[in-house]
Image: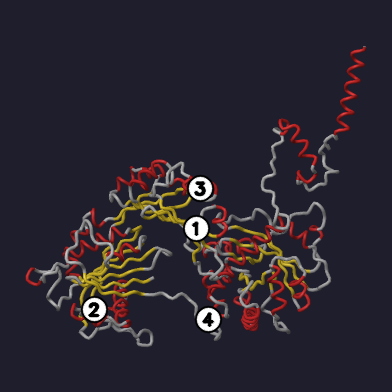
Amino acid sequence: MLDIRKDDGPHSKVFFSHTLLPGYIDPRNPSTKKKPFSTFLAQPFSHTVDLILPEEIYELVQAHLEKASVGQLHYARVFMRLGELLEGDFFTEYIKKGNIMMLSEGRPLADNVFSLYEGKLRLELDRATYERCGLVGQPVEDGGRKHQKARWVVEYDLRAPSMLHGKKGFSRLEWACRNVLNQSLMWLFSDLRSSTVEALRKGPIAKHHPFVATVQPETSVLENVASPNLTISGLSGLYKQEVSMALLEWLHLANLNSPRVRQDNQIDSFLSRYEVPDFGGEIVSQGLVRVRWRGFISPRFVRELYLRARKHSLQVEEDKRDGEGGTSYLEEDRWCAITAKAFEGYGGCYTVMQFAGRDTLTWECD
Amino acid sequence: MFYDLNVPWSDNSRELQRTIAFLDELGYDTVALAHTLTGRLPADLLIWPPQTPPIPSPLPFPTSRRLRILRRCNISLTDAATNHRIPQLQKHYDIVAARPTDEKTLAQACTNLDVDLISLDLTQRFEKHFKFPMLGAAITRGVKIELCYSQALLSSDPNAKRNLIGNATQLIRVSRGRGLVFSSEAKSVLGIRAPSDVINLASVWGLGHERGKDGLTKEPRAVVEFARLKRTSFKGVVDVIYGGEKAVEEKETGKKATNAQKRKAASMESTPVSLSEQEKPASKRQQKRNKKAQEESEKEKADE
């Protein structure tokens, strides 16, 4: 409006990578440092996961996704105090011996929020609460003035041997939980060790009366989508910023079931000038299927989904295999894509597009 | 924690209830209901013991438990010479704000007056431009400047918006972004905007994103906390949280208790010791005299 505005809004970044998967992936112990697996692990709390694939490929994997053990997601909602995480059965069974993740209610840069992942308890507190707690933390940016600290993060590794009842460091945390952080909050809880409902209903969490939610996937068919005909040989042409972002934009528009990516899209050019990018090839019309899960989603679930979708739907035929686990057929155009969005304040979103063979495209947005 | 420190109190409780509910929904955590006083103070505030202020407590309608409601008083400064009896207002209201109308009263408010906020009616045209030394004096003292954004949004006067934008940009430039607090002065629900919207509005007027966020979180928190400290503690340094009210156990400590009570300041009462009902501990001479008198009376009894 007036020319005195400073350009200091948030700068969001998108990291695009094109990787080759390792030749053999052990399903029980896949790598954690290579993309896309590192991408999955970098976003611990996701609320929506979408699997987008062409129709003919979906039919191959449909039966597997409808199996309860794979396609269903379980999580629980409880009302608890922070102190109750640290006492008795809950502490020993879940935190010391087991593997859970929890997220408390609250807005990340405005209220006091707590999260637990991989045994690390993270408390994000504002100045008044931090000073009353008496715990040691690191200041963190909260969107206000740069050198005036207003928000602190206190982290505790609850799996460390020094975190036992009776030890001084632990009793300081307990004191803070008893006297300062003693409000009852709503938490989201997910047990990463077991994936059955009974474990949630009968374990130590049962005494807090959780509300157990079972999430079924929602499938929606997107018909007549104008898609670019991408093949593996053309992937090196995507390295320019505009081109890779155009592909991401198309994928997300298809995910939203937008009329702009339909074959029969007719809209006045005054309102929208979007055109489906062709990447030097042609535009074909195909049907896409989107399978969506909404809930408290762990990286393990996304990884399992990815491995299964790849195994069942993107198999390379015998005669086209090259020695390294990939495909020698350069006109391969079968793909599937996974998009996961994180809870606000705990990340952005990522999209992984896997082609049959070894090529993987990853976009990580923060 | 987002603060909205200026929601005008109105007797129409339905509209006010809607306003407060909407503020809660948008994510505000603390809201101050404001009552404007002009001219002379009403008599009922001046007598002792003071009557209740016009904003009742508890409020006549239910509000969300998460929202904290404070009471605020706006004093309209029309004449530099009147005594506004601010200490008495401070007893009744959580925040006291001054609304100067001209140059002289602005100077008085910035340099002398013991208010918590200086609120300017930005829809009026000011003849003279704002000067940094005056506003700087207020900010160093800890008195913040308040910008109300909703008056111009809803008013029917075409000049109001123009004046608001001109005055706001000027204030932001002159104060260099420090010491500003944003609040709505929304008489109805329609004048309220979400915190991010207010930050964006401030950014259009020239205040960076970070300082805009501060103007909604850190600065109003400073106002509320300083106002609270002014009222409940001695110069912000000493505040009695727990006065040790255990009357029964003092008999055991006997000697220690009497020694402690010998110091007048130890009891921390507001009434002077001469007027309190505490018994002054007897001095050593008096104790000796009492003992002697007691022995003599016993002797007399024994003789009889």
The answer to which quarter of the image holds residue B38 is bottom right
Q: Residue furthest top?
A: B304
Task: Tell me if I can see residue B156 in this picture.
Answer: no
- Please say if A129 is above or below B120: above
Q: Nearer the viewer, mark 4 or mark 2?
A: 4
> Do the residues at pointers 4 and 2 share their chain?
yes
Marked residue nearer the N-terminal end (3 or 4)? 4
**Nearer-N-terminus badge (2/3):** 3
The residue type indicated by label 2 comes to: Ser
Residue wearing tag 2? A227
Percent x, y for residue A237? 24, 83
Judging by the rendered image, the residue that carries numbered circle 3 is A172
Q: Which residue is found at the position 74% from the left and 74% from the top?
A: B100
Residue that carries the numbered disc 4 in the rendered image = A6
Mark carried by residue A137: 1
Discs 2 and 3 carry the same chain letter? yes
Between circles 2 and 3, the one closer to the viewer is 3
